[in-house]
């Protein structure tokens, strides 16, 4: 699965907004054992309930917010690649912050620690700037997508 495909599914599943009143209406759907296992496995991977995943995807499709694979546009792929890139950049920032925290935690300082700490601070700043640029680019791509 491409990063853009995974990000699209995650974006759609997470986008479903809560309502003030509990959803009470049901639609029953039948799946094969294999289909149900695949749905539940994907829902678990995304940290969602199976019904939430299926409902979010169906509603997104009905709202013309989720194109079927044959209806995807290059802009859809661009938006999803930005989302995947942002996730990777955030992970890098988290790792650098953990390094900085470890160095700031005390203990016996090594001569190289201050240089590593300074580089970690610089890297965190670069990652934050890059994330901001990716967010801006994704926002422009999403705005253009909605306008199209």
Image: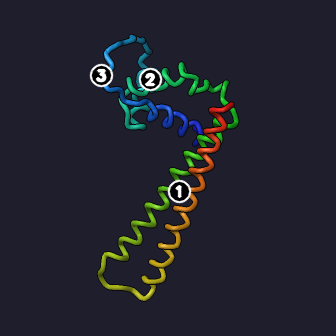
Residue 71 vs 1, above or below: the answer is: above
Point out the tag, 3 or 2, that comes first from the N-terminus: 3
Dot 3 and dot 1 residues touching (CB under 8 Å)? no
Which mark is on residue 101?
none
Q: Residues within 10 Å of mark 2 (few under 14, many from 20)?
A: some
Q: Position of residue 2 (x, y in %)?
A: 60, 40
Residue 121, image x, y percentages = 47, 73
Kindly state the secondary structure of the residue where label 3 is placed.
loop
- SS category of the residue bearing label 1: helix
Q: Is residue 23 left or right of residue 42?
A: left
* Extreme-bottom residue of the structure: 111
Q: CA distance from mark 1 to mark 2?
A: 29 Å
Helix, strand or loop at label 2? It is helix
Residue lying at 38% horizontally and 37% vertically, measured from the top left: 47
Give the numbered dot on residue 89. Answer: 1
The residue tagged 3 is 22
**What's the image's color scheme?**
rainbow
Residue designated by label 2: 54
Q: Position of residue 15 (x, y in %)?
A: 46, 33
């Amino acid at each position: 699965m491409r990063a853009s495909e995974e990000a699209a599914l995650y974006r759609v599943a997470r986008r479903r907004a809560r309502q003030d009143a509990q959803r009470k209406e049901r639609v029953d759907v039948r799946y094969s054992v294999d289909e149900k296992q695949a749905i539940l496995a994907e829902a678990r991977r995304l940290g969602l309930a199976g019904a939430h995943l299926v409902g979010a995807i169906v509603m997104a499709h009905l709202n013309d917010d989720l194109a079927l694979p044959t209806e995807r546009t290059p802009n859809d792929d661009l938006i999803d690649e930005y989302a995947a890139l942002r996730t990777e950049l955030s992970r890098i920032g988290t790792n650098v912050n953990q390094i900085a925290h470890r160095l700031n935690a005390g203990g016996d300082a090594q001569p190289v620690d201050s240089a590593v700490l300074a580089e970690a601070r610089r890297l965190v700043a670069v990652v934050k700037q890059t994330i901001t640029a990716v967010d801006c680019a994704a926002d422009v791509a999403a705005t253009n997508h909605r306008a199209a």
